[in-house]
Image: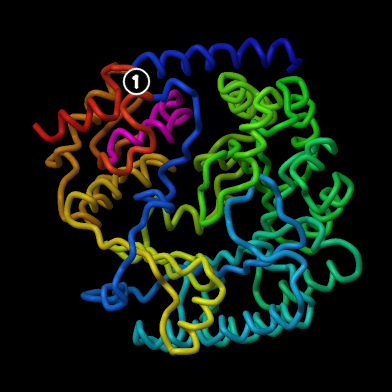
Amino acid sequence: MDFEEIIKLAEVRKNDFFEMQRLGMHCNTGEFIPAGVHYPPITLYPDIKYEKMYEGYTTPSDGFIDLYVHFPFCSKCCVFCHYPSEYKNSESHKDKYIDALEKEFQISLNNLGIERFKPRSILVGGGTPTDLTPAQLERFLKYFVKYTDISNNPQFNYDVSPHTLVGDIGLERLRILKDYGVNRITIGIQSMDEKVLKIMNRPHDKKVALESVENTMKMGFQTNIEFIYGHQGQTLKSWFEELKQIVQIDSHEYQFYRLKIDAYGDQQGIIKNIKKNHPEDFPKPEETIMMKQMVFDYLGSFGIEENLRRVFTRDKSYISKYAFNQCCMQYDQIGLGLTAFSSLRNRFVLNTQHFDQYYERINNNMLPFNRGYVRDELAQQRWAIILPLKNWFIIKKRYKQVTGTEIENTQFYPIIQKLKEYDLITEDDNKVALTKKGAFFSDELVELFYEEKFIPKPKEYFNDGPLNPYTCLKQLTK
């Protein structure tokens, strides 16, 4: 597939983008507001009283609770990152954090009334959770397996930066991870363009990225590599050149993220000011849409298909079980560490984003959360539509399990029917799913089910069309 051919295919999707703007579903500025991984959006959670966290909550009957652990340390600040971290930090501070994190494990287990966590899947992320010395990494993993039952061999994933997996120290880290049951590595390469890597302020170059993948594959880890498109310095032509290199990398999974400008986590990324001051250096919204379609067409020509939103594999079994469990099946999940979140049946709680508050809470034998949301009946119904529909599809039987209601009997069902009229949704007796077009615009589509206060843009940003989120909301409240 050559450049002219792939651009011709991408032009079709660009026209769909303009159609979505005309219908009112996509905002007129073309801005990208990622949706459907959390609902409400993670930056909009209110303060929550401490006693509300576990009030009325009981652990799942099967005993499984998925785990996320966060390490807020990095060697450099990437311009696109929206999460607070400390950079080139002292080993003594990392030791302090590892100690506090162990105590958080103990407090959390005590609050749940269990002796050990029993996860279906595990994700350790950041930050850069391998931005530790090998001794520190092993110290954490020793108590992790003490408090976590991994006898059922869950997918145990580390989300890391390439530069931490190369050289003698990098290989030692990989050996330690392997020894403690880690079986999957996600490597944030982000770009195969040396110029773009420098613009991003990444701590690695292309050679290091490829070496890190080679090391993880040789040691038998299931390997996932991540990339960003729509970034400053990228063009349609340069992105095509990147894709040609990406498909040559031997990896089990490939993930692609559209650049986020507005804060998606607890820290506004530097990228917002860069975009404000140099908008001409960034692809236009319609070009970014074309870049996304290029991923589908070019990877598809090599048998690499999207099997979970943003996730491309040759074999469906290689998808992230953590993402699948959290977003598609909506299983209970506990987060530990700074800014980590917990999603527990009908509530969502966020740990503090401030180091001093984190340590103060832990020292007082308290869980370190400071924001959260206990969903009422309608909010639970929205949540049970938005996450699985965005990321996979709604299993009707599962929907009733998590809401107590048949999806056909909710006030949101007319929106589903309307979306069918525009070839965005399909339905049968067992599931509600997005069509190919609907899946492509899934972030914007699921916002039609949002409560008004969580719609990311004001009314004036949308055309007055039949798929305007405010129009759909008004129809719900009639």
Residue placed furthest toward the front: 277
Q: Main secondary structure of the magenta part?
A: helix
Q: Which residues are magenta?
A: 434-450
Residue position for label 1:
24
Total numbered badges shown on the rendered structure: 1
Q: Nearer the viewer, residue 182 or 315?
A: 182
Element assignment for label 1: loop
On screen, residue 330 above or below 171: above
Q: Nearer the viewer, residue 120 or 19?
A: 19
Q: Residue at x 60, y 16 (%)?
A: 10
Query: What x and y, as percent, mark residue 128?
Result: 69, 63
**Residue 465, quarter of the rendered image:** top left
The disc labelled 1 sits on which kind of residue? Gly
Query: What x and y, as percent, mark residue 285?
Result: 56, 23
Q: Nearer the viewer, residue 459 or 389?
A: 459
Left or right side of 446 for 321: right
On screen, residue 475 above or below 333: above
**Residue 26, quarter of the rendered image:** top left
Q: Residue at x 43, y 89 (%)?
A: 365
Residue 436 is one of the magenta-drawn residues: yes
